[in-house]
Amino acid sequence: MSAEILLSVSGLHKAFGGLIAVNQMQFDVHKGEILGLLGPNGSGKTTVMNLISGALPPNEGKVVLAGRDITSLPAHTISHAGIARTFQLVRILPDLDCIENIEAGLAFRPGPLWGDAAKLAARALLDRIGLADHAHTPAGDLTYIDQKRLELGRALALQPKLLLLDEWLAGLNPSELQEGIALVRKLKSEGLTIIMVEHVMDAIRSLCDRCVVMNTGTKIADGTPETVLADPEVIRAYLGD
Ligand code: ADP
């Protein structure tokens, strides 16, 4: 692929005591692509996301965003540099309404927005994520897919260059899944670059331009969804061989 590299991860290593969770990971993410980060449970995917977003420092290796070395910077600095994430467990503020939830995100971006400017921007964001009719609904009263939309909205409020989705499509019913896939596709069409940790095969096949597959901390495949999902080593890893 000739597109510009937005994120480059090299020699990334993280151990917890004697357990090597991430071992010499290396991959690039090109501007505008959706990269799937796959692998069986415990293979190190969330740890890689934590190392990229600054939730954890690596023992070794480098993370470079748009030419800037962001390795081991604090999470808020990395967020200002342009990386936002969602979490496996939805982290919204259940007692606040949707506008207020988005406003809380807007207050953390570089050039924070407050007051009327924040309200206007929050409404535009709710429209973008399909929650325009829920501006004043308390987040805790939203359906599950709408809570997920809202969490995505809070991440988008940071105006990221790179969005990290950690099993964002997990737990949705079949029709919600199609809505979720459509929303991620729309974000890509708007030019956003995305890394998604995902197990839902339909989503991987229909959304990912490329997939990196991990097993026991190590990269075992890198290629199109069709190629990696047909790779015997990947199939063995998923079957727990
Ligand atoms: P995945 O996201 O692919 O399921 P993780 O990155 O969560 O994998 O975990 C990789 C390995 O690291 C697992 O063996 C897990 O138990 C271990 N691990 C993850 N986080 C920690 C931690 N904070 N302390 C100790 N071990 C951890």
Image (cartoon, grey):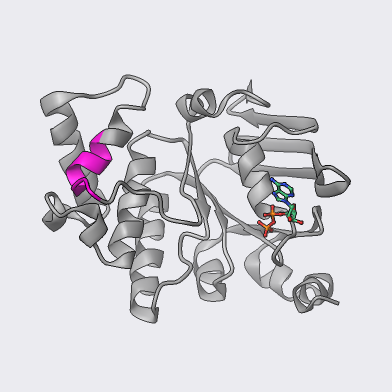
Q: Is residue 73 above or below residue 180?
A: above
What secondary structure is the magenta-colored segment mainly?
Answer: helix
For image coordinates 34% across by 49% down, the residue present is 92
Nearest the eye: 182 or 62: 62
Q: Position of residue 141 (x, y in %)?
A: 21, 61
Nearest the eye: 160 or 33: 160
Q: In the drawing, does residue 50 fall left or right of residue 92? A: right
**Residue 67 highlighted magenta (yes or no):** no
Q: Is residue 222 above or below residue 126?
A: below
Quarter assignment of residue 134 = bottom left
Q: Position of residue 77 (x, y in %)?
A: 52, 22
Q: Residue furthest right?
A: 18
Quarter assignment of residue 171 = bottom left
Q: Residue furthest top?
A: 111
Circle count: 0
Q: Quadrant of the C terminus?
A: bottom right
Q: Is residue 182 above or below residue 150?
A: below
Quarter assignment of residue 238 = bottom right
Q: Position of residue 72 (x, y in %)?
A: 67, 26
For image coordinates 70% across by 73% down, the residue present is 229
Residue 167 in view: yes
Residue 2 in view: no
**Residue 97 highlighted magenta (yes or no):** yes
Q: Position of residue 70 (x, y in %)?
A: 63, 25
Nearest the eye: 138 or 6: 138
What span is in magenta? 95-103
